[in-house]
Amino acid sequence: MSIAPHGGKLVDRLLKGEDLAKASKRALALPRIVVDAYTAFDIDGIAKGIFSPLTGFMGEAAARRVLDTMYLRDGLPWTIPILLAVDQATGDGLAVGGDVAIEDDLGAVVAILHLAEKFSMDHAYIAEKVYRTTDLEHPGVAYTMSLGPVFLAGDLDVLKAREIEFQEYNLTPRETRAAFEARGWKRIVAFQTRNPVHRAHEYLQKVAMEICDGLLLHPLMGTTKSDDIPGDVRMACYTTILDIYYPKNHAMLSLMPVNMRYAGPREAIMHAIIRKNYGCTHFIVGRDHAGVGNYYGSYDAHYIFDEFEPGEMGITPLFFEHSFFCRACGNMASIKTCPHDKSNHVFLSGTKVRDMLKAGEVPPVEFTRPEVAKVLIAWAQGAGD
């Protein structure tokens, strides 16, 4: 029996058949709002059950409860409110109790919002709770502070799922659950990433695979920072390393079409909950999970799990220290398993790696697989032109 979704039921807000046809026709006569890519990805997350048990955008009471207590309701952890904001004029023109058509950033009408509530909330309060800072240099804070002053809440009927690049890998929670069952996997560990897999990542994944039936390599493919490595480059790295260095019957690749919020500890909890909805039983939490800059401590994303009762999360977090190759040990290790001085450890900063790649230099095999480095060199040299 597979792990239960968060809240007990996998949400599906995508209309089909006659219901879809009727709603699509009705949407043409409704007042319409236009949303950005960030909100469009949130709509998709609600539609497919990625954000189960949410059935729409949060109202004020739910949002404040999440911000202040990190619970959606008693016994159900939730750390980041999922909100829809519009400008004042747009908000003033919409009536509570009515329906609103939502057009996405690509020009498609993707959903109907059953408007149950309009409210305001201090953006700095949201930022401080979610990101632990109001510094506008933080990308999540900057986005939050740019939002309109009126929040709209209510259930969604979704007319169209969002398709992304490499759509064939964009499995829904229902589809990953079916894939796990077909493979006979009962213990599934998920690995979150928005970067190519290097040797330290590989080490963490394979240690976790020793106690699980299979690995879900689950890179985030929603909105990210402009300086993150492009999705097509990352996908080439993922498929390359999986084909060569992972057993096909114990590892699979799927995409997570969710925004990167860079919320550190609170986002680590959300990433665990989301993977639970995808059917995973275990979740790897590494150093500075979902962090950015120096806003969070290296292991704050580990410590936040202690703020919840055992079993409340419904998925088992696996906490890992920073990993490295130790020349004295002759293998990958962490400070838990290696007794040797740091001079034996192979650490490379992101800046150092980028400089090497742009120069056409292959980083040491202790840091990255050469096949992955080849993909990154081709990208880095092109990006530097």
Image: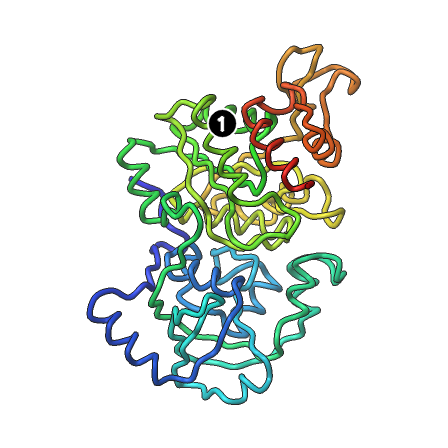
| Residue 151 higher or lower than 245, as above or below | below
Looking at the figure, which quarter contains the N terminus? top left
Q: Position of residue 16 (x, y in %)?
A: 25, 64
Q: Position of residue 29 (x, y in %)?
A: 34, 85
| Residue 337 higher or lower than 155, as above or below | above
Residue in the foreground of this view, choosing between 378 and 91? 378
Task: Place residue 343 in its image quadrant.
Answer: top right
| Residue 211 higher or lower than 105, as above or below | above
| Residue 65 higher or lower than 297, as above or below | below
Q: Which residue is mark 1?
A: 241
User: Which residue type carries mark 1?
Assistant: Ile
Q: Residue at x 43, y 36 (%)?
A: 216
Identity of the residue furthest to the left in this view: 18
Task: Place residue 212 in its image quadrant.
Answer: top left
Q: Position of residue 147 (x, y in %)?
A: 62, 72
Q: Residue at x 47, y 41 (%)?
A: 218
Looking at the figure, which quarter contains the C terminus? top right
Q: Position of residue 59 (x, y in %)?
A: 50, 74
Left or right of residue 271: residue 347: right
Left or right of residue 160: residue 42: right
Q: Give the colour scheme shown.
A: rainbow
Residue in the foreground of this view, choosing between 123 and 79? 123
Q: Residue at x 71, y 21 (%)?
A: 346
Q: Circle 1: is it few (<14), some (14-19), or many (20+) Cα within 10 Å?
A: some
Q: Provide the secondary structure element on which disc 1 rests.
A: helix
Q: Residue at x 41, y 80 (%)?
A: 100
